Amino acid sequence: MPCGGTTPGLPNGRGNTWRANRSNLGGVGRYAVHVTSVSKCSALPNVVHASNTVTGAVGGLTNAPVTP
């Protein structure tokens, strides 16, 4: 690993990017993008872009900060 892992410790929780996705959760899902681990590596953050759209989500697009 080039730098620290994730919290909680997962092998796949860093450097993920979500961009231009469309989701319809039908009123039953909480988030279209639910980030469950946070990268400890500032060089490999998880990024959710504002170009994603969701309908029918109970909680909204994401539980993470949204990047314009």
Image (spheres, grey):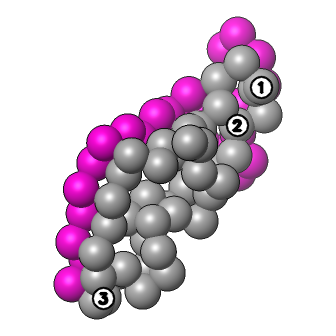
| Residue ID for mark 2 | 39
Q: Residues within 10 Å of mark 3 (few under 14, many from 20)?
A: few
Q: Quadrant of the C terminus?
A: top right
Relative to 23, residue 55 above or below:
below
| Residue ID for mark 3 | 28
Segment colored magenta = 1-26
Q: Position of residue 24 (x, y in %)?
A: 21, 72
Between residues 35 and 54, which one lies in front from this camera angle? 54
Q: Residue at x 38, y 39 (%)?
A: 19
| Residue ID for mark 1 | 42
Q: Position of residue 25 (x, y in %)?
A: 25, 76
Q: Residue at x 33, y 59 (%)?
A: 53
**C-alpha span from label 1 to label 3:** 33 Å
Between residues 68 and 11, which one lies in front from this camera angle? 68
Contact check, label 2 and label 1, Cβ < 8 Å: yes
Q: Residue at x 70, y 37 (%)?
A: 39
Q: Quadrant of the N terminus?
A: top right
Amino acid at circle 3 = Val
Mark 1: secondary structure: loop
Contact check, label 2 and label 3, Cβ < 8 Å: no
